[in-house]
């Protein structure tokens, strides 16, 4: 009898504990699904808003092109009244050019959205981050010079060995370099620096551009919150997602009129805790 009681004293609390854990997991899973659904709803709503503008422009210009072409009297053209016809055709060509540009913009928006929502499929390899950053500096130097930028770099005096997807990380660095360039329309200085800090490899990209207003900083890495006109609003959001999928962080410090500095921190090999989204 005492054996039965002892068994019950052990089994019942254990069963209760397992039940509580199962309920917590179920609650967490339900909350995660709600959060995921809300995020997807917000993103699709923002995507629809972004798509609507170029579609509206395309629609208007198609209508104007049709009207311009309908206004051509080919019988007049046969009577050598060519000036009016050429004017109408010239106007139609300009509108077709606008349509082509807006179509390209629409394609960029959709491609950017698909890239952002796609689950990262990283091909991780062990490499020295100094080498990767140095390659990107060499690659970007001609473009920097063509925009009157002085591109400087200072790489760590020791290897910064990390587990990274070189292609994905180069995409992040290129995005940050282009952003810096666009913030310095009249030229300026672009600095790329790497160093080690507390088991992390650090990459800093700073510029002497116009800076970012303080009110825009909290939402800078959110989708469709671009700090400049004409951007897709997904570049920095995608960069953040890629860096975090490596187990790293990305941050920004900026002051209007004094430029900006973006900082990427990645775990050094042996210190990494790569996101569970990435399969080894």
Image (cartoon, rainbow, N blue to C red):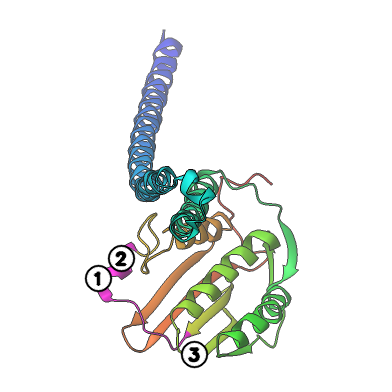
Report the number of numbered marks. Answer: 3
Q: Which of marks 3 and 2 is nearer the N terminus?
A: 3
Q: Quadrant of the N terminus?
A: top left
| CB contact under 8 Å: marks 3 and 2 | no
212 part of magenta stretch: yes
Question: Which mark identifies residue 187?
Answer: 3
> Looking at the picture, does residue 181 appear above or below residue 16?
below
- At horizontal 33% and vertical 46% (from top left) the residue drawn is 49
Image location (x, y in percent) of residue 74: 49, 45
Using residue 162 as the reference point, say whether residue 12 is left or right of it: left
Quick one: SS at disc 2? helix
Is label 3 or label 2 in front?
Answer: 3
| CB contact under 8 Å: marks 1 and 2 | yes
Q: Disc 3 to disc 2, how far (Cα)? A: 27 Å
Q: Residue furthest left?
A: 215
Residue holding disc 1:
215
Between 14 and 50, the one lying in front of the other is 50
Q: Disc 1 to disc 3, how far (Cα)? A: 25 Å
> Looking at the picture, does residue 168 appear above or below residue 174?
above
Image location (x, y in percent) of residue 106: 47, 49
| CB contact under 8 Å: marks 1 and 3 | no
Start-end of magenta stretch: 207-219
* Quadrant in the picture for residue 254: bottom left
Between 129 and 231, the one lying in front of the other is 231
Question: Which mark identifies residue 218?
Answer: 2
């Amino acid at each position: 009898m005492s054996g039965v009681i002892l068994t019950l004293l052990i089994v019942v609390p254990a069963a209760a504990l397992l039940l509580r854990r199962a309920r917590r997991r179920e609650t967490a899973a339900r909350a995660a699904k709600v959060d995921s659904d809300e995020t997807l709803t917000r993103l699709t709503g923002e995507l629809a808003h972004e798509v609507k503008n170029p579609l509206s422009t395309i629609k208007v210009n198609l209508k104007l092109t049709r009207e311009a072409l309908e206004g051509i009297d080919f019988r007049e053209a046969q009577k050598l009244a060519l000036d009016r016809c050429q004017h109408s055709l010239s106007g139609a060509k300009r509108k077709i050019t606008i349509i082509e540009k807006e179509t390209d913009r629409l394609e960029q928006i959709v491609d950017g959205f698909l890239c952002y929502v796609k689950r990262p499929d990283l091909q991780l390899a062990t490499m020295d981050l100094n080498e990767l950053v140095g390659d990107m500096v060499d690659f970007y130097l001609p473009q920097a010079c063509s925009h009157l930028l002085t591109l400087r770099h200072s790489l760590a005096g020791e290897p910064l060995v990390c587990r990274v997807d070189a292609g994905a990380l180069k995409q992040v660095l290129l995005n940050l370099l282009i952003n810096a360039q666009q913030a310095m329309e009249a030229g300026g200085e672009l600095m790329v620096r790497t160093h080690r800090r507390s088991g992390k490899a650090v990459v800093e990209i700073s510029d002497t551009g116009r800076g970012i207003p303080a009110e825009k900083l909290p939402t800078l890495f959110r989708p469709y919150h671009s700090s400049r006109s004409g951007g897709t609003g997904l570049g920095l959001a995608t960069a953040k997602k890629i860096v975090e999928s490596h187990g790293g962080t990305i941050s920004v410090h900026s002051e209007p009129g004094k430029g900006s500095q973006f900082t990427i921190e990645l775990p050094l090999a042996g210190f990494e805790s790569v996101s569970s989204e990435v399969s080894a």
